[in-house]
Amino acid sequence: MPSTPAIEADDLVKTYPGGRGRPDVRALDGLTLTVPAGTVHGLLGPNGAGKSTTTKVLTTLSTPTSGTARVAGHDVAREAGEVRRRIGYVSQGTGADPLLTPRENLVMTGRLRGLGRSAAADRATALVDRFGLTELADRGTAKLSGGTRRKLDVALGLVGSPQVLFLDEPTTGLDPEARAAMWDEIRRLSGEDALTVLLTTHYLEEADRLADGLSIVDRGRVVAAGTPDELKATLAGDTLTVDLVEPDADVVRAVAAAVPGLGEVLVHVEGPAGRLVARTPDGPLLVGPTIAALQAAGVRHGAVAVSRPTLDDVYLRHAGRSWTSADTSSTGVAR
Ligand SMILES: Nc1ncnc2c1ncn2[C@@H]1O[C@H](COP(=O)(O)OP(=O)(O)OP(=O)(O)O)[C@@H](O)[C@H]1O
């Protein structure tokens, strides 16, 4: 593996004007990232965490307020043209023109990237074959299924034979079958073509299954990085989760603190529902004492679960709130 990383971002800051007297939005707040060449790297974070902004800066579509980044060996600000020649970018929305056929879309993109007529046609045919689109290549793009259209989007990102491919939420909106097919495709790309892939996602499972390395992004910063297994291994033991009914968070914290063996404890309250999440070296052993202590304090509870650490737990540890609640409530930070 070459020693120069495919992507290096150092202390990126991006501030958007708040508008109408509102404070500025600090979409990136000192984001630092390294992606080795030939790997799939996941940028994982809830809505508004700063994933798309990171991708826009790395693909030269947006200029950072401060900080530096190099992609495929070139500086995104000073050598934007060099970077663009070496990357492919598949945005969240489809890039394909619905009025053209898939093949026409591929040829047009090739021409726009400077390929001659026959080179663009050859590249289109190669990508049509590569993505199993032969039968659909000359039919209307508008009639393609969501999964096939997304495949075409990825094919369009590969027209320029990039070294680094950026995929912004490649499987959002796809059904489970199409999502699994896209995962296979992405794995194949990095394995066979030695391509570096940076993908943004807010699906924990996608990151867990697909990424060689992960950066968990929250509020414009990387809060944890490593392989999925490394990240999970930072959390030894089990996670004990107890659903709570109309809890008083202070009471629950006090009760949990008095149960010997319960480690880090987080209590979430959302409306009438709540949840206690605790790290413990031995989950099954601690279920009985924890429930007894809650009941003795008059705390009503629902389901109790013991699980091995997941990426959600890793996120919880670093961001101080669970993935699900972050995903629904976070809209980024206004400062
Ligand atoms: N052009 C813009 N002007 C003002 N604020 C913006 C702009 N683009 C993004 N933001 C804000 O910057 C923050 C980060 O947004 P970004 O789109 O990078 O997050 P994300 O992690 O990609 O989220 P999503 O999964 O929803 O795409 C959010 O608070 C967003 O509202």
Image (cartoon, rainbow, N blue to C red):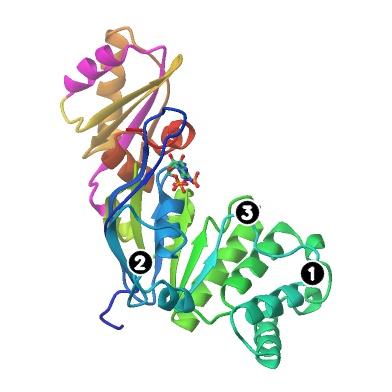
* Whole-number angstrom distance, CA of label 3 to CA of label 1: 27 Å
For residue 122, above or below residue 201: below
Q: Residue beneath label 1, please?
A: 100
User: Which quadrant would the N terminus be assigned to in this image?
Assistant: bottom left
- Answer whether residue 244 is magenta in the image: yes
- Give whichever of 212, 293 is nearer the camera: 212
Q: Residue beneath label 3, please?
A: 176
Circles 2 and 1, Cβ within 8 Å, touching? The answer is no
For residue 131, above or below residue 291: below
- Indicate which disc, 2 or 3, sits on the residue closer to the N terminus: 2
Label 3 CA crowd tier, 10 Å (few <14, some 14–19, many 20+):
few
Asked where in the image residue 196 lies, by quadrant, the reply is: bottom left
Q: Which residues are magenta?
A: 233-259
* Whole-number angstrom distance, CA of label 2 to CA of label 3: 38 Å
Residue at the image point whose x is 45% and y is 65% from the top: 59
Task: Look at the image and tell me whether residue 310 can be seen.
Answer: no
Q: Residue beneath label 2, please?
A: 77
- Answer whether residue 107 is magenta in the image: no
**Residue 228 at x, y percent in the picture:** 34, 57
Q: Secondary structure at mark 2?
A: loop
